[in-house]
Image (spheres, grey):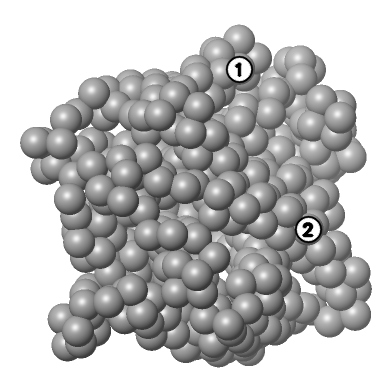
Amino acid sequence: MLLSTLRLPTTLTEVSGQNPPPGIPVPPSDPVPLYGYSANSSQHCNCLSLGILLDIQKYFGLSDGKTGLLQTVFTLCYMLAAPIFGYLGDRYNRKIILGAGIFFWSGVTLGSSFITELHYRIFVLSRGLVGIGSASYSTIAPTIIADLFEEGKRTTVLSIFYIFIPVGSGCGYMLAAGVAKSTGDWHWAFRVTPCMGGLALLLLILLVPHKIQRKTAAHRALSISGMIGRADEKPDVHRTAKTTWCQDVGSLIKNCSFVCSSLGLTAMAFVTGALGMWMPLFLYRAQVVQGLVPPCLQDSCNSSNSLIFGGITIGAGIVGIIAGAEAARRLRKINNKADPLICASSMFISALCLYIALMVAQTNILSTFIFIAFGELFLSVNWAVVTDILLYVVTPRRQSTAIALQILVSHLLGDAGSPYLIGVISNAIQARNIPSLQWSFRSMQYSFVTCAFVGVFGGGFFLLTSFYVEEDRKEAQRL
């Protein structure tokens, strides 16, 4: 109901609350659709491959290390494509870029469902191509929201946008598990998902004005410089000097708040990537050790853990993102450094909850689910807040590039390697011990401890951000 009634502002008066200055064209007042929310949800339905991870592992006969490589290849291609789309998004029509990315992603996902067990390398390649398609709208969509909303409302809208990260991820787990169970063939999960991409593409084509983003961005740059509402001046919307990509990157590297918050986000991505890839399998192995479920010997395995983990991801994500946005809105009135301090606190608490979940997994599976839920909840607190930090410490004309670089760094050092690293550590531990169900579980448990320590480092980087955020914010407003 909330999404069906939400309307984004499309005129300069709605965005700023003031009349537009002379010489700035006013876009049409048609509603801008929630294509960003649909795209975000469809993107994170890529988690469907993780919801049927055990089936895929058995189908191709993969070790833990090779299984983790699937997500690593997806993330590597995603992060390498992000700077390209960031460059294009700052300079060319965003609607066309978004549409091409969604179409490409949907087509490759459908095609990958027909790959046989003899062509594992082609399946790996298809995951990389899906990552390239996903990078297009993940890079550009937040900047469109930034163009349309001033700071007071932007955090709320971003929180709604980022709610669809856990919703899409959770639906991916649940959809994959449900389709695989009902059809008896995990391939059908990859054939159903492109429908989400088709819906997002349809909304994009039918409802999004062709040039509204670029006009609004020009207005917002003028709004920040204080030129709106001054009738005695006739500003030129082309006055802002164009800069090269290298100049933009050089400026961003000198922005301490951007660098530190990006490293904090990298720690979040590391933990999230590892959890998303391996947690259902870890829970299954814990249940096998406790004697709650028998070992999977048939072609189609029990997917109940994927369903439960998907539900936890949705619930914890929604609550966490809403709580983070509301906490940021209230605490900013008291402390200008509230945003990075919220992110630091939530990272520390999340790391503690995840560590406890790992330690109790062998004896009490219910407690494990509870602490995983709290760990995911506190991780989700940061998604919208981190993006909002970027949007107010970086000037508008560099925001697409900044988001693209943040995606590149967070995935390069974060979830691009964490699934593969967890799998490799698990393999190494198993190789040093006698093969057994007990060591199959313990190897995954010990490798997962890495995530708790990385979470603590992420909290430290957000603490560092709090030392620089006020100065960088003033500099961005000045520019």
In the rendered view, would you say 29 is above or below 424? Answer: above
Which residue: 76% across, 20% down?
31
Q: Quadrant of the N terminus?
A: top right
Question: How many callouts does the rendering have?
Answer: 2
Check disc 1: other Cα within 10 Å, few if <14, some if 14-19, many if 20+. Answer: some
CB under 8 Å between callouts 2 and 1? Answer: no
Which label belongs to residue 319? 2
In the rendered view, would you say 50 is above or below 34? Answer: below
Where residue 327 sits: x, y (%)?
A: 84, 69
Residue 349: tell me if it is visible.
yes
Depth check, mark 2 against mark 1: the one in front is 2
Where residue 131 sits: x, y (%)?
A: 33, 43
Where residue 262 sits: x, y (%)?
A: 48, 71
In the rendered view, would you say 302 is above or below 457? Answer: above
Which residue: 80% across, 38% down?
15
The secondary structure type at the circle numbered 1 is helix
Q: Which residue is mark 1?
A: 203
In the rendered view, would you say 408 is above or below 177? Answer: below
Which residue: 28% across, 60% down?
68
Q: Amino acid at mark 1?
A: Leu
The secondary structure type at the circle numbered 2 is helix
Q: CA distance from mark 2 to mark 1?
A: 27 Å
Q: Amino acid at mark 2?
A: Val
User: Is 239 left, or right, of 270 in this rendering?
Assistant: right
